[in-house]
Amino acid sequence: MSRICEEFPGTLPTRALWELEHDPDQLVLTIMQLRAYARTKAAMDRAKTAEEAPTGALADLVMDITTDLVREAIAARRAARGVTGQDDGRSPE
């Protein structure tokens, strides 16, 4: 309940408890997770060195999603150019 009150200023503990007990989809927890992901992603984007970057499970998730998005973007660009197979991106010599 404390985290809910911190995450949503002005929320009373009784309201936080009510949200947990009456929302079968746990929307408040989903919002908190999405905000934590966004904060972690922003901290990773701001980090100038590996030591400054956050670590942990959420940072790993950010890296996995970022990697997947980059791979999808590369595949889409290759598909748009009609490139097939394991093209390394270099032009033929």
Image (cartoon, rainbow, N blue to C red):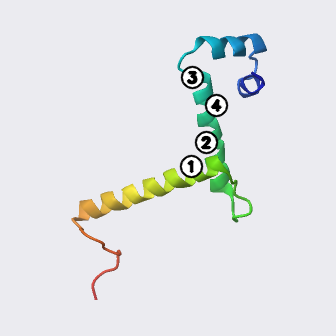
Quarter residue 71 falls in: bottom left
Identity, as a three-letter code, of the amino acid under mark 4: Met
Identity, as a three-letter code, of the amino acid under mark 3: Leu
Q: Earlier in the sequence, mark 3 or mark 1?
A: 3
What residue is shown with label 3? 27
What residue is shown with label 4? 32
Neighbour tally class for label 1: few under 14, some 14-19, many 20 plus, Cα within 10 Å: some
Q: Is 53 placed above or below 1 here?
A: below
What residue is shown with label 2? 37
The residue shown at (70%, 53%) is 54
> Alpha carbon of mark 2 to alpha carbon of mark 3: how far?
15 Å
Q: Earlier in the sequence, mark 1 or mark 4?
A: 4
Q: Is the C-beta separation of discs 2 and 1 under 8 Å?
A: yes
Q: Is 59 placed above or below 49 here?
A: above
Give the number of the disc on residue 61: 1
> Alpha carbon of mark 1 to alpha carbon of mark 4: how far?
15 Å
Q: Is residue 64 left or right of residue 90?
A: right
Q: Is 18 placed above or below 60 here?
A: above
Quadrant including the N terminus: top right
For this rendering, which residue is in front, 1 or 92? 1
For the image, the number of numbered tags is 4
Q: Nearer the viewer, mark 2 or mark 1?
A: 1
Q: Is the C-beta separation of discs 1 and 4 under 8 Å?
A: no
